[in-house]
Amino acid sequence: MLSRVAENLYWLGRYLERAENTARFINSTTQVLLDLPKDAAFGWDVLLKVAGLDDIFSEHYPQADEDSIVRFLVEDERNPSSILSGIHNARENARTVREVLPMELWERINSLYLYARDNASRASEGRGPRIEVLQGVIGRRESIIGLLTGSMSQDIAYQFIKLGRNLERADMTTRIIDVNSAVRLPRDPALAIVATERMWMSTLNGLSAYQMYRRHVSVHVRANEVVNYLMKNSHFPRTVLHCLGEVEGCLSVLPEHKDAMKKVRQAWRRVESMQLNDLKPTVLHEYLDQVQSDLGEVHTAVARQYFHLHQNNGTEQ
């Protein structure tokens, strides 16, 4: 397979996953804000910092208010990580590799793009329309993955899409978890307990993980148990450890995977060794930063080996 095709497939997977998880990210934050008691504190600008987009945002917007941040994250194509940008880029990547994709997949991605283009502006009209639009993006994106897994041969092309999807998913899961580390809880202990439970319940719901958490962990939502579940559970498909296992499985069928596999196992060991009981928010934030850095190293190793190897060789000659 040409490195150009492999790279487009990989980024197709990442862009679609980023768009869906950004929608989940915003919905989860919206729900957290609705559930917090009055004397708890949380600002929308936290989303920008957690997503690593605060510098880009400040270049285009004078004030970090809710409307501006939602517009920036949903529909502003000057933001390469906005939902509309991600879906647009995924559509362009799919268009260039249509010969290796099921015909219906291209049609479904194009339909998702048209929906996002026509409805993205509604996300700024209020929290009700916002949740409706973002759920529409999530549902359409989930139908694409269902079609992909049910109608595409699980060959090398499929593995590159799956590789990109799971790397992006692991990264975005850490960022959705990280939002709660920035909430300042009420001073009243009873209110703080209630606020904490609602925050983490919103996080679980944002990742469609609430029912599985209740089934496999507890009917009670406790911060350390939620973080432990979303980081380390090997069975739920949105946890960091599960995604790393999927990445490892993809790499195992690709040639010359030694360096990238080494980085994956480094990330795996870090997550496995984390002591997640009774974590302070600042410590949790540092842990998540470390995992995000590890995932960045996995991406760099994958890109160096499969997308830019010919360029590196050319430079060395």
Image (tube, grey):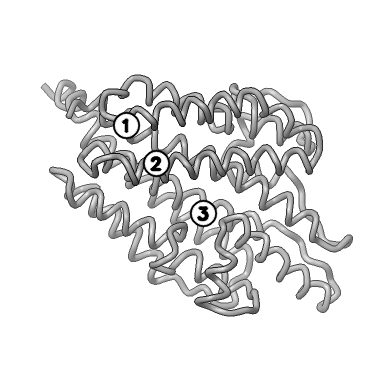
Q: Nearer the viewer, mark 3 or mark 2?
A: 2
Q: Which of disc 3 and disc 1 is earlier in sequence?
A: 1
Q: Which of disc 2 and disc 3 is earlier in sequence?
A: 2
34 or 259, nearer to the observer: 34
Q: Secondary structure at mark 3?
A: helix
- Is label 1 in contact with label 2 (beta carbons under 8 Å)? yes
The single residue placed furthest to the left in the displayed view is 317
Q: Which of disc 2 and disc 1 is earlier in sequence?
A: 1
The mark found on residue 147 in the picture is 2
Q: Position of residue 131 (x, y in %)?
A: 71, 44
Q: Alpha-carbon neighbours of circle 3 within 10 Å: few (<14), some, or many (≥20)?
A: many
Which image quadrant for residue 53? top right
Kindly identify which residue carries mark 3. 173
77 or 278, nearer to the observer: 77
**In this rendering, position of residue 193 left or right of residue 37:** left
Kindly identify which residue carries mark 1. 102
Separation of marks 1 and 3 at Cα, in angstroms:
28 Å
Which image quadrant for residue 75? top right
**In this rendering, position of residue 142 left or right of residue 98:** right
